Image (cartoon, rainbow, N blue to C red):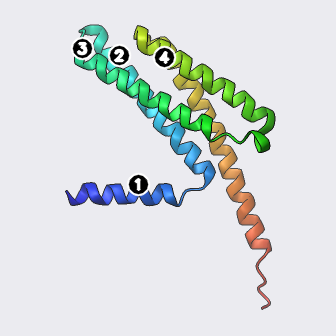
């Protein structure tokens, strides 16, 4: 019981102290993790149809769709301009593909979305890293060591 409380507290602190870039990466991580789970369950289900497994696949895909929706609402169209519009279109497509994949138990569609999300996650990782380096450089330049 204490372990669950400690883990929950750790996760809450991690989210509360994360930068905006890190939060986006966490969302991508969560979506990819859910899609990996759905794909794994789908592969097991191909060998032996199990209604309970089908429900678990559906829940994992829906969780990934919820994360994609969260990414959609986090877009800033004023600052992001064309990039935000393009991401919005891509996220809309992701949700449509995942809905169709869930209905048809289509692992190929899930894999396509999963791989694209992994690519986007890697891009956001680079952006977050360069932003952190830039912030660190600004902080170092602003320090007056002479007093």
**Tag nearer the camera, 2 or 3:** 3
- Spatial CA distance of label 4 from label 2 is 15 Å
Residue position for label 1: 11
**Tag nearer the camera, 1 or 2:** 1
Image quadrant of residue 73?
top right
Tell me which label, 1 or 2, sits earlier in the chain: 1
| Residue located 44% across and 10% down the image | 106
Residue position for label 2: 42
Mark 4 and mark 2 residues within 8 Å of each other at the beta carbon? no
Element at label 4: helix
Locate residue 11, reporting x and y percent. 41, 54
For disc 1, the neighbor class at 10 Å (few under 14, some 14 to 19, many from 20) is few
Tell me which label, 4 or 2, sits earlier in the chain: 2
Residue 142 visible? The answer is yes
| Residue located 40% across and 11% down the image | 105
| Residue located 68% across and 57% down the image | 132
Residue position for label 4: 99
Q: Which mark is residue 51?
A: 3
| Residue located 36% across and 21% down the image | 58
**Tag nearer the camera, 4 or 2:** 4
Q: 106 and 47: which one is in front?
A: 106
- Image height check: is 141 above or below 144? above
Element at label 1: helix
Mark 1 and mark 2 residues within 8 Å of each other at the beta carbon? no
Image quadrant of residue 81?
top right
Q: Quadrant of the N terminus?
A: bottom left
The outermost residue toward the left is 1
**Tag nearer the camera, 1 or 4:** 4
Tell me which label, 3 or 1, sits earlier in the chain: 1
């Amino acid at each position: 019981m204490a372990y669950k409380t400690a883990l929950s507290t750790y996760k809450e602190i991690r989210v509360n102290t994360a930068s905006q870039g890190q939060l986006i990466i966490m969302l991508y991580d969560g979506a990819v993790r859910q899609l990996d789970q759905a794909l794994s369950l789908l592969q097991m289900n191909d060998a032996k149809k199990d209604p309970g497994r089908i429900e678990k696949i559906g829940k994992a895909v829906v969780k990934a769709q919820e994360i994609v929706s969260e990414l959609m609402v986090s877009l800033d169209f004023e600052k992001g301009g064309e990039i935000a519009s393009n991401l919005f279109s891509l996220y809309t497509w992701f949700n449509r593909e995942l809905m169709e994949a869930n209905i048809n138990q289509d692992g190929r569609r899930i894999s396509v979305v999963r791989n694209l999300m992994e690519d986007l996650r890697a891009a956001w990782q680079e952006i977050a890293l360069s932003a952190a380096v830039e912030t660190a450089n600004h902080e170092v330049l602003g320090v007056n060591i002479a007093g």
